[in-house]
Image: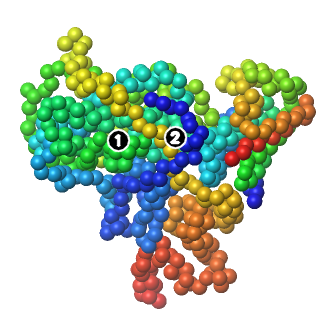
Amino acid sequence: MIMMMRYNIEGGDFSAAGRASSEVKKTLKQFNISSLVLRRIAVALYEAEMNVVAHAWKGIMNVDIQPQRISVVIEDEGPGIEDIGKAMEEGFSTASDEVRQMGFGAGMGLPNIKRNSDEMILSSTPNVGTRLEITVNF
Amino acid sequence: MKQAVSVLTDMMKDKNYRHSIQIDRDKCIGCSHCMRVCSTQAIRIVNGIASIQPERCVDCGECYRVCPQRAIYAKDDGLASFHDNTYKIALVPSVFIGQFPSEYSATQVLNAVKTIGFDDVFEVEQAVDFMKEAYLIVGKEDNVQPLISSYCPAIVRLIQVQYPSLTQHIMLLKAPHDIAALYLRQSKEKEGVDPEKIFIYYITPCAAKIVAARDPVGESTSSIDGTINMKEVYNRTSQILWGEKNPDLHKTFANMSPDSVKWSLSGTEKNYFAGRSLAIDGMDNAIEFLEKLESGHIVDIDFLEMRACDQGCAGGILCPGNRFLTVERLEQRQKKLQKLQKRDNGSVNNGLMDYKETLHTLSDVDPIYPRDGLLLDENMEKAIIKLQRIKRLLTYFPGFDCGACGAPSCSSLAEDIVKGKASISHCVFVQRVMEKNYKLSPDQAFIVIEKIWGKNRLNKYIDSNANES
């Protein structure tokens, strides 16, 4: 039994940022899952969505819900990540000053996603895009 | 106060669904005004009458405000519930005093309330001085961010129903009326009143406080014995006060710190929590904010003061007066108390604070758990199947939430269908198509409409057709 959902994410559209992750959260509230798990998923997906908005041109969020877990793939077309190891360090960010002034780009996004998910797979090709897969068990 | 989260209790649910908001089936004409304003989509029209889904209702009373038939009421205990030979105390919130023009002093209003049939009266906001101290203590603890005020019971219930993952943010402290009641029990007993005979009645500005007093969240019993609709007390008090201005009757000292009288409004409580705090009032505003907070969009806020009603309790559904006038009058009262406080070299004489040590040991409540008002099915596989059906159903529905099906939106109808509470033919658009394809006879369609909007609801159209032809 699988439930699939798909959302587009617009790069640079900060005013609409968080819409996709909000929709997923709304859906999950209809299931009998713990409120702590719900919160972890909401936070991880919001951070992932913000990464696309802040860094990429455009992206897609593919959500796959199964009775035991939720798995989300966020793929974007964008500058990609040069050094994934470095990007995973807390406090590291390549965000522009403009983005930082809006309160983003503190370099906590990826570490925060990792903390809030049970599995996280990150791959990237510079100047092509990034693929992030997050799994959270219910 | 322990705001820690226990993983073991993480799946616990609050199954208490009793409510104060009720529908008078004799008065309701099923006009659906209430259904359209309900913030939690808790209302449906069945057999021509509005019906409230108990697991979703948060007793905010928005439906009460819009009902043109006055068919929605807040069920309280009322003055009729008085027992003989008891020592009756009225707990009066400051907003009640704010219902009367400033020429009537607080003392005069409270005396008038007493005359109705109470042995004593007490202004709830005297307990706010205690709350301020409790907030100082909580503010120093290692708390989840942000803590959400437990003051407004409609907000607490909104979080339980719609924002399950935020229940652990609700402050585990009793409300001022509970603290006031605890204090009165102790002080009256000390004065020699038989504790068995003490009955404490809260004069309530809203339905949510009635539920909070009857079925408190995070407490097994309430320290309040009964609730009385503010309108009932207002009518009786007005009769006594009418034309009886008595300028000599007023306080001679400040019995609480001056801004305590504004605690129930919006914007005072938040000043007493250390760090960054926000004051949010109105259901829509609260929902917008909680939505963002739950999604993780908002960080670094320490405290949220929230009131379901615009202008806080001055906008309570059972307050007869205008909310803005009430706010202004309470501001005037604050100034009067400031003068008294200044005259006594800044000192306040609040008897409740003599009991603060004991009250601090009694002020905590148990953790608050979510309700499952949004749940499609306990079983995950079944829930996913239901959700898939909902998505499929939504492709058939027009999507403009006309409400002709007796549900507030197309998605509510889809949910009702998968829960077995409605059928696809309830949608008038689907009905037309079914009739065209001979899947539904006009007579059957008629019966469907009558099931939603009530028997004989369509009679007048039949008559006029007969006349025309």
Q: Secondary structure at mark 2?
A: helix
The colour scheme applied to this rendered structure is: rainbow
- Say whether mark 2 and mark 1 are on the same chain: yes
In the displayed structure image, the side of residue B82 where residue A60 appears, left or right: right
User: Which chain's residue wears label 1?
Assistant: B
Query: Percent x, y for residue B44?
Result: 48, 63
Q: Please, is residue B71 above or below residue B359 in the view?
A: below
Q: Amino acid at mark 1?
A: Gly
Query: Percent x, y for residue B282?
Result: 44, 41
Residue B334 makes an appearance in the image = no
Q: Secondary structure at mark 1?
A: helix
Question: Which of A123/B250 is in front?
Answer: A123
User: What residue do we see at 54% from left, 53% from top?
Assistant: B372
- Mark 2 or mark 1, which is nearer the start of the sequence? 2
Query: Percent x, y for residue B207?
Result: 34, 49
User: Which chain's residue wears label 2?
Assistant: B
Query: Percent x, y for residue B206?
Result: 33, 46
User: What residue do we see at 14% from left, 37% from top?
Assistant: B193
For marks 1 and 2, give the one nearer the viewer: 2
Question: Which of B228/B403 is in front?
Answer: B228
Residue bearing mark 1? B315
Mark 1 residue crowding within 10 angstroms, few (<14) / some (14–19) / many (20+)? many
In the displayed structure image, the side of residue B360 where residue B86 appears, left or right: left
User: What residue do we see at 28% from left, 35% from top?
Assistant: B182
Residue bearing mark 2? B167
